[in-house]
Amino acid sequence: MALEYDSLGHLTPAAERVLATASALFYAHGLHAVGVDRIAEESGVTKKTLYERFGSKDGLVLAYLKRREDQWRNHLEHCLEEHPEAGADRVLAVFDAADLWYTGRSTKGCSAVNARAEAGPEDAGQSIPVEVTAQKTWMLRRFCQLCTEAGLADPELLARQLLLLLEGALVTLGTRSFAEPMQVARQTAQALIAGRAAPRFR
């Protein structure tokens, strides 16, 4: 996929309009339900322009997922800067960041999970499922790094447990099974972290 950028390294205005329109439509209605005709019409460009900028619908979906992931990572790192010292508070700041990011903004849960849910198991090696897995693997590594820096025991296992809590909370935001799932996930994470705060003796 060869996106079109201006001299400052930004997407051209037409490409930006297409991506912004597609992002809103994909999140609200799903990938399969939204066609390129509607995206082109609502963004005020021709289908030819859309394909010139993004190559294909899959290319546009990937740009949507990557843009949203970049925004999340920037938001997360900004929140982590408020807890510069390694420790439990810095790990838990991930859940605080997610609460700020998703609650009220992402009423249908995680865009990446939703995109993966629309692909069948036979599509595992295709570009969109691969991108989703890469995003979640990045979050797992970031959790592991934070747990290691905090000196917590079994940081790799703890990172997996924390990712499960985070992902479960994101799904619950979408299903609305109960209120404030991210805060429940944070409380559970805090209990897990407390149990790993001192080295284990074997």
Image: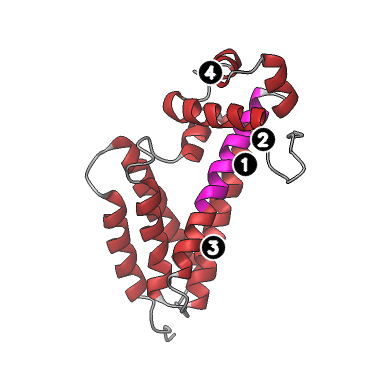
Looking at the image, which residue is at 65% across and 27% down? 14
Residue 42 image label: 4
33 versus 87 height, above or below: above
Q: Report the Cα–Cα distance between label 4 and label 1.
A: 26 Å
Question: Which of marks 4 and 2 precedes in the sequence?
Answer: 4
Q: Is residue 137 left or right of residue 126?
A: left
Q: Amino acid at mark 3?
A: Arg
Of the residues shown, which amino acid type is indicated by label 4?
A: Glu
Which quadrant is the C terminus positioned in? bottom left
Between the C-alphas of marks 1 and 2, the distance is 6 Å
Q: Earlier in the sequence, mark 4 or mark 3?
A: 4
Distance from Cα at disc 2 to Cα at disc 4: 26 Å
Q: Which structural element holds mark 2? A: helix
Instruction: Tell us which disc is closer to us: 2 or 4.
Output: 4
Label 2 belongs to which residue?
127
Give the percent coordinates (x, y) of residue 87. Answer: 42, 77
Number of marks in the rendered image: 4
Q: Secondary structure at mark 4?
A: helix
Q: Amino acid at mark 2?
A: Ser
Say which amino acid is labelled 1.
Glu
In reply to whether residue 63 is colored magenta, the answer given is yes
Q: Residue furthest left?
A: 179
Q: Name the residue that disc number 3 marks.
A: 142
Does the residue at mark 1 contact the one at mark 2 (Cβ under 8 Å)?
A: yes
